[in-house]
Image (cartoon, coloured by chain):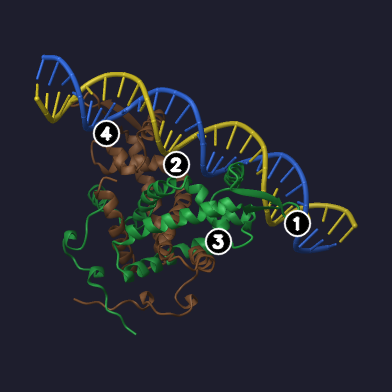
Chain colours: A brown, B green, C blue, D yellow
Amino acid sequence: MIKILDVKRLHIDRPLTLIGMEDEVDRLVAAWRRERPDLDVEPLEVLSRVSRLARHLDRARRLAFSEHGLEPWEFDVLTSLRRAGAPYQLSPGQLLTQTLVTSGTMTNRIDRLAKKGLVERLPDPSDRRGVLVRLTPEGRDRADQALAGLLAQERAILAQLSQNQRGDLAGLLRQLTAPFDNIPG
Amino acid sequence: MIKILDVKRLHIDRPLTLIGMEDEVDRLVAAWRRERPDLDVEPLEVLSRVSRLARHLDRARRLAFSEHGLEPWEFDVLTSLRRAGAPYQLSPGQLLTQTLVTSGTMTNRIDRLAKKGLVERLPDPSDRRGVLVRLTPEGRDRADQALAGLLAQERAILAQLSQNQRGDLAGLLRQLTAPFDNIPG
DNA sequence: CATTTATATCTCGATGTCAAGATATTCGTG
DNA sequence: CACGAATATCTTGACATCGAGATATAAATG
């Protein structure tokens, strides 16, 4: 099964205006090539875009969540618990690996969410060092509402791409993230 | 000019193990489909990977820069000035748009870099509201050294992908970032 | 068993970021 | 030229994050 490339994805030399807009990274890369013609800055074409897009997404999400009275970090924790399924509880350690923050940060987050009544701490019956964090019914509702809002926003952002392009993009990103996610780094 | 897709990029239903590793977002999406089968969570396949990869990259960069005695935020500011070309100076406002931080943050960053002797503040001769931030010779050297280290690290991360895949990925990301970079958002 | 090593979570101080507002200067209009 | 709007930067206070270390418990080893 072979598939012909969508014309927009061909590697052809032609003005960017024909296939889409220039972005800040194009300008950044052009500047480096002018200032440091001795260096190969091609890696920036991919990874600088990842970082910059992530910052834009952070800002957009902050806006979307504020309509539901949640901060991005609150959403991250609540939805991690929500995804776990009933009874919606995980250990702080499990939450760490999902949210990529340090243990001190997670302790602080759980404290604040507990104070707002969105989660509660329970002793882990099988390990007296451990704790279980459980979503309250209100926490669950808030998570569900915010998720719907987030998905709507993300669909709008992704409307730039065709269905196939979205699939390709997801696959390429997976190849880059998998080593980080699977090798304990 | 038509180009045949690299086999790794085909949309074929088959176990992920044949084309690459599973990542944390695969698990995340599977969990949502189990818990909320009523929702279409496809957008997460792309945008959650962007955010998570960005966090991994942040950590990796912090390591790479620490070998040159720089923090990531220092690198961002110094290299913005470096790219501007001689005499390596920009206004704080121009630095804002390149680094995606707020004005208060940039003021703080310039203060700290000036204290370390890596940049200096000059009055803007053409606008008395304005200031110009200029790289010192040492700031320039540090930026150049750290850039070389960063590129080496990024090349290693991108070794997961073929040349064509990197080009495709850059193009797809550009389509998503361009609206943010061009429409003042 | 005793001891060492590993794990799970929390504490605490330092710090970077943000948001909102303050100040100073310039621009656009009439 | 006067005046309100826009722009450029800085100030401030609140706050989330990190990193290193502390504490308690569990697992591994001999």
User: Could you tell me the amino acid type at mark 3?
Assistant: Arg
Q: Is residue A136 above or below residue B63?
A: above
The reply to whether dot 3 and dot 4 touch (C-beta < 8 Å) is: no
Which residue corresponds to mark 4?
Answer: A91
Q: Is residue A50 left or right of residue D6?
A: left
- Chain bearing tag 1 is B
The Cα–Cα distance between marks 4 and 2, rounded to whole angstroms, is 21 Å
Is label 3 or label 4 in front? Answer: 3
- Chain bearing tag 3 is B
Q: Residue at x 42, y 44 (%)?
A: A72
Is label 4 or label 1 in front? Answer: 1
Which residue corresponds to mark 3?
Answer: B83
Q: Nearer the viewer, residue A84 or B75?
A: B75
Which residue corresponds to mark 2?
Answer: A71
Q: Residues within 10 Å of mark 1 (few under 14, many from 20)?
A: few
Q: Is residue A170 left or right of residue B173?
A: left
Is label 1 or label 2 in front? Answer: 1
The reply to whether dot 4 and dot 2 touch (C-beta < 8 Å) is: no
The Cα–Cα distance between marks 1 and 3, rounded to whole angstroms, is 22 Å
- Chain bearing tag 4 is A
Which residue corresponds to mark 1?
Answer: B125
Asked if marks 4 and 2 fall on the same chain, the answer is yes
Q: Nearer the viewer, residue A28 or A162?
A: A28
Q: Is residue A8 above or below residue B48?
A: below
User: Could you tell me the amino acid type at mark 1?
Assistant: Pro
Q: Residue at x 18, y 27 (%)?
A: A126
Q: Quadrant of the N terminus of chain A?
A: bottom left
Q: What x and y, as percent, mark residue A15?
A: 48, 78
User: Could you tell me the amino acid type at mark 4?
Assistant: Ser
The Cα–Cα distance between marks 3 and 2, rounded to whole angstroms, is 35 Å
